[in-house]
Image (cartoon, rainbow, N blue to C red):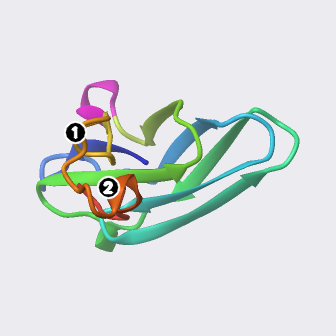
Amino acid sequence: MGSTTFEHDENTTAPAAVNLSISGGTNFAASAWLNEHYLGSSFVPRSPTNNESFPVSGDMLVNETNYVTVLQESHGTQSRLVGRDETQQFTSWKVVGNLGGEDFPDKMRKILNEGKMKLC
């Protein structure tokens, strides 16, 4: 799972869509969220990369940091906000999941509980 952020307030243009170029090898799938709003899924049976454009409406945005989260089987995304200036794009990108790497703190459930589905 990966997450990226962008800032939004009354002085910035609302994006029309989120474009994602998702690489996961052949036969991979991915799903995307904007904040708590489900944007959609992508299943690619015969291509290592898929380009998706997910429409964004104003009610999906918050007047602060907004999070785009992508759940996929491998990482390698490029993303941008459609309809916004290059200076008003995503502010960070990070991979979320397994806290502590190989030194995970939950020794009872091991890594099975470390990558919980959540927005960070």
Question: The residue tagged with tag 1: helix, strand or loop?
Answer: loop
Tell me the residue that label 1 is attached to.
100
Front residue of 1/58: it is 1
Check residue 7 for magenta coloring. no
Image vertical order of residue 7 relative to residue 48, above or below: below
Residue 68: assigned label: none
- Cα distance between the residues tagged 2 and 1: 9 Å
Q: Position of residue 20 (x, y in %)?
A: 54, 41
Q: Position of residue 94 (x, y in %)?
A: 30, 35
Q: Residue at x 53, y 43 (%)?
A: 19
Question: The residue tagged with tag 2: helix, strand or loop?
Answer: loop
Q: Residue furthest front?
A: 108
Q: Position of residue 59 (x, y in %)?
A: 30, 73
Image vertical order of residue 76 relative to residue 28, above or below: above
Residue 114: assigned label: 2
Q: Residue at x 63, y 47 (%)?
A: 52
Q: Which portion, as a residue range, is magenta? A: 85-93
Earlier in the chain: of badge 2 and badge 1, it is 1
Check residue 90 for magenta coloring. yes
Label 2 close to label 1 by CB (< 8 Å): yes
78 left or right of 116 in image = right
Q: Position of residue 43 (x, y in %)?
A: 74, 55
Amino acid type at mark 2 = Glu
Amino acid type at mark 1 = Gly
